[in-house]
Amino acid sequence: MGHVFITRAVPGRAVESLTAAGHSVQLWPGDLPPSPEALAAALAAADAAFTTVVDFVSPAMLAASRHLKIVANMAVGYDNIDPAAAAELGVWVTNTPGVLAETTADMAWALLMAAARNVVASDRDTRAGGWKTWSPTGFLGVDVFGATLGIVGLGEIGEAVARRATGFKMRILYHSRTRKPALEADLGLEYAAFPDLLAGSDFISLHTPLTPETRGLMGAAEFAAMKPSAILVNTSRGGVVDQDALIEALRSRAIAGAALDVTTPEPLPLDSPLYTFPNVVITPHIASASLATRSRMAEMAAENIIAVLGGGAPLHPVNRPTNPRHT
């Protein structure tokens, strides 16, 4: 049986599943992740690593961890690990797909509505004693019903966001690596070139993975191409947005606002200018944070570990080592 290192307390029955399978579990204490040095030391003694999106596992850590056979990431994205480097070293990398799309789409929609209708700003003002009377001009927002939504990346989450938008009778533009004719017909979506989506959308919601091609996808030129009345929503990865360019776009009023569940870095330092804009909503990377979804994600990561330490292949691999390390 193997030794499993888990970088944080997780919900659900994941730990129970691992121990029931006969594996020993080392759980990192506290809410903060292990430091790079602590993570490297723990991986060096582990047969399996159960990680989260904020645990950056370098190729050097993998190379030094001679017994490590799998890094099971509790996320759909895996930009915190290099799957190709891991495969060369015989280490599986896995993710947890197919369970968080609806939950994340709910959050994207919550952020969109919060930004459109000044929910956070008005709540903050009310708690500070600012509510003196009903005001005809107080916290005027923008309508969502009938507006144009631009979706960048039409995977499972982007599709789930689009389905919600149909209930608001929105015009839905999308840009993705591949066209989706069936979804176009089903939901009335319109494929748009990226510049056309930027220019034509009242709201833009980002749902792309972080790759070398998408890093900084939203930069100064892209913000300049957006409507001055448009709002950006990001529940993908912070690196998809050039944050300095976003700050300048907000300062110059090139766009009307932003709602961000992800930033660069995470957590966002308290001296970031983003906190100074009342038209910006910031949440701490909680798009998948429902009890049911996070529990299932943790359980899937455990299932991947159990499969590999049992001598088989994982259920949800994102790489495929030619010569996997054996138990």
Image (spheres, rainbow, N blue to C red):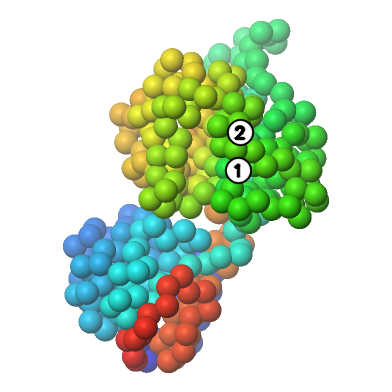
The residue located at (43%, 15%) in the rendering is 252
From what the image shows, is residue 36 above or below residue 24?
Answer: above
Q: Position of residue 164 (x, y in %)?
A: 73, 44
Q: Secondary structure at mark 2?
A: helix
Q: Amino acid at mark 1?
A: His
Q: Secondary structure at mark 1?
A: strand
Q: Position of residue 240 (x, y in %)?
A: 44, 43
Q: Which residue is mark 1?
A: 175
From what the image shows, is residue 315 above or below residue 112?
Answer: below
* Total count of labels: 2
Q: Position of residue 227 (x, y in %)?
A: 58, 21
Disc 2 packing (10 Å; few <14; some 14–19; many ≥20): many
Q: Which residue is mark 2?
A: 197
| Marks 1 and 2 in Cβ contact (< 8 Å) | yes
The residue located at (32%, 81%) in the rendering is 90
- Is residue 35 visible to the viewer in this orientation of the structure? yes
The residue located at (60%, 38%) in the rendering is 193
Left or right: 120 with respect to 15? right
From what the image shows, is residue 10 above or below residue 23?
Answer: above
